[in-house]
């Protein structure tokens, strides 16, 4: 399985994502610059955190128009796995690959600390190795992590079980305590907490590691069922 870690001007968690794939999975991984126009050689695209293009408009609003995002949309349509973390989540909502938007934290302060998440849906390629209802410790680091959507969208997310993580103690005011969601198909996930910063006990938690191993398991299961080696 081959991973791409996108790099925008202002990305600062790209190295963390790269190292997480290396240490947690030992699978091939490349940095891919925002001007790239071909992601066909990758099975999973990671859209990392940071401050893409300086976040000089809304977070992710400029990155949404980067050439590579056309390829991310194609990859998602093809059923490949896409994971947007923090600023990556913001970019995916701006690109229309996930519903809703991210607003300023209700405290109007940047929040940077460990937080406890509850796994709401483990019937998903990104969460299958967790137990439903399991509580995991994953760090956050954001000023605009307050997830918002209208009532109809929220009802759809709830009914389709597209909410995969909720905060146990909401740090930013997100509607319905949402920390992470998926698209209807289940192959695109966005979350504000940073699983790539929780893959080793030295970092304070290994609870993020199962996200990466879940993705690898899903990819292997898909290929085995299709008879592809």
Image: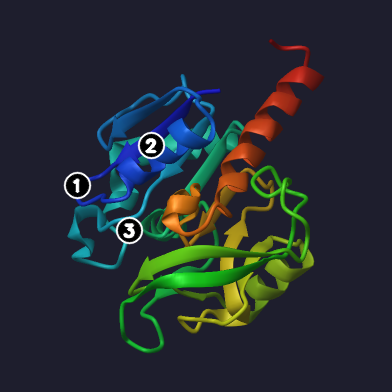
Disc 3 on helix, strand or loop? loop
Numbered label attached to residue 18: 2
Tell me where residue 6 appears, x and y as whole percent: 34, 38
Tell me where residue 155 appears, x and y as whole percent: 71, 74
Q: Is residue 21 left or right of residue 210?
A: left
- Residue occupied by mark 3: 60
Position of the N terminus by quadrant: top right
Position of the C terminus by quadrant: top right
Disc 1 on helix, strand or loop? loop
Earlier residue among tags 2 and 3 = 2
Calculate the distance from the C-alpha at mark 1 to the C-alpha at mark 3.
Answer: 11 Å
Residue mark closest to the camera, 2 vs 3:
2
Residue 168 picture quarter: bottom right
Earlier residue among tags 1 and 3 = 1
Q: Residues within 10 Å of mark 2 (few under 14, many from 20)?
A: many
- Residue occupied by mark 1: 9
Tell me where residue 128 appears, x and y as whole percent: 73, 46
Give 187 or 218, whichever is nearer the viewer: 218
């Amino acid at each position: 399985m081959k991973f791409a870690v996108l790099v925008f001007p202002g990305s600062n968690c790209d190295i963390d994502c790269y190292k997480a794939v290396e240490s947690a999975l030992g699978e091939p991984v490349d940095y891919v610059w925002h001007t790239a126009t071909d992601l066909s050689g990758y099975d999973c695209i990671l859209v990392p955190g940071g401050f893409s293009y300086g976040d000089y408009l809304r977070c992710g609003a400029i990155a949404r128009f980067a050439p590579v995002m056309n390829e991310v949309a194609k990859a998602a349509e093809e059923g490949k796995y896409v994971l947007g973390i923090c600023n990556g989540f913001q970019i995916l909502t701006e690109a229309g690959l996930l519903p809703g938007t991210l607003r300023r934290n209700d405290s109007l302060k940047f929040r940077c600390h460990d937080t406890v998440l509850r796994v709401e849906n483990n019937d998903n390629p990104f969460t299958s190795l967790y137990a439903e209802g399991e509580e995991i410790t994953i760090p956050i680091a954001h000023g605009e992590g307050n997830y918002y959507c209208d009532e109809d969208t929220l009802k759809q997310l709830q009914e389709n079980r597209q909410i995969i993580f909720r905060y146990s103690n909401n740090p930013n005011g997100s509607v319905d305590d949402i920390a992470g969601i998926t698209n209807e198909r289940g192959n695109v996930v966005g979350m504000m907490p940073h699983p790539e910063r929780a893959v080793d006990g030295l970092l304070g938690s290994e609870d993020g590691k199962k996200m990466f191993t879940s993705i690898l398991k899903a990819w292997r299961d898909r290929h085995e069922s299709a008879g592809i080696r």
